Amino acid sequence: MNSRFIVTCLAVSAAFGPLTAAATANTGDALQRVVSYGDLNLESHEGISRLYMRIKSAAKDVCEPLVFSGTSVSLLQSRCQEHAVEQAVADVRSSRLTTFHMSLTNQLAPAQPQ
């Protein structure tokens, strides 16, 4: 199992247009942070909680570039962070992490096929 992944804000550039696209810096690279979790037990609530905190912190880092300006900054940063967290949770492919995330964001679990 891979024990690290990248939280990035590149995927949100299409949704938020030039403002977020500009957040990819002058290099044209996406702002990103590698999140490692090989030291965590993803079978425990504590391990899931710690990983989620790392994901949220990385999302905050990649979604708060200095080039954001204007009155809708808070909304754009919030949407960027939400998207980055959702993508990172999906990338881990842990049902426990997904359930934890959904409980914190008041989302309903997808229906299980019978």
Image (cartoon, grey):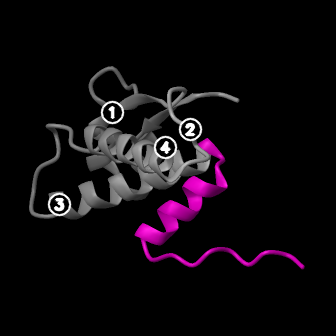
Callout 1 amino acid: Thr
> Residue 40: horizontal and vertical position, in percent?
51, 34
Q: Residue at x 68, y 74 (%)?
A: 110
Q: Is residue 14 visible?
A: no
Callout 3 amino acid: Ser
What are the residue bounds of the magenta stretch?
92-114
Count the marks: how many?
A: 4
Give the mark, 1 or 4, whose residue is nearer the N terminus.
1
Mark 3: which secondary structure? Answer: helix
Q: Which residue is mark 3?
A: 74
Of 82 and 53, nearer the camera is 53
The answer to whether mark 1 and mark 4 are in CB contact below 8 A is: no
The answer to whether mark 3 and mark 4 are in CB contact below 8 A is: no
What is the distance, in whole Å, between disc 3 and disc 4 at their CAs?
A: 30 Å
The crowd level at tag 4 (other Cα within 10 Å; few <14, some 14-19, many 20+) is some
Give the mark, 2 or 4, whose residue is nearer the N terminus.
2
What is the quadrant of residue 74 in the picture?
bottom left
Q: Which residue is mark 4?
A: 47
The answer to whether mark 2 and mark 4 are in CB contact below 8 A is: yes
Nearest to viewer (mark 1 / mark 3): 3
Q: Is residue 41 above or below residue 105?
A: above
Mark 2: which secondary structure? Answer: loop
> Residue 82: horizontal and vertical position, in percent?
38, 58
Q: Is residue 62 left or right of residue 88?
A: left
Q: Which residue is mark 2?
A: 41
Image quadrant holding the N terminus, namely: top right
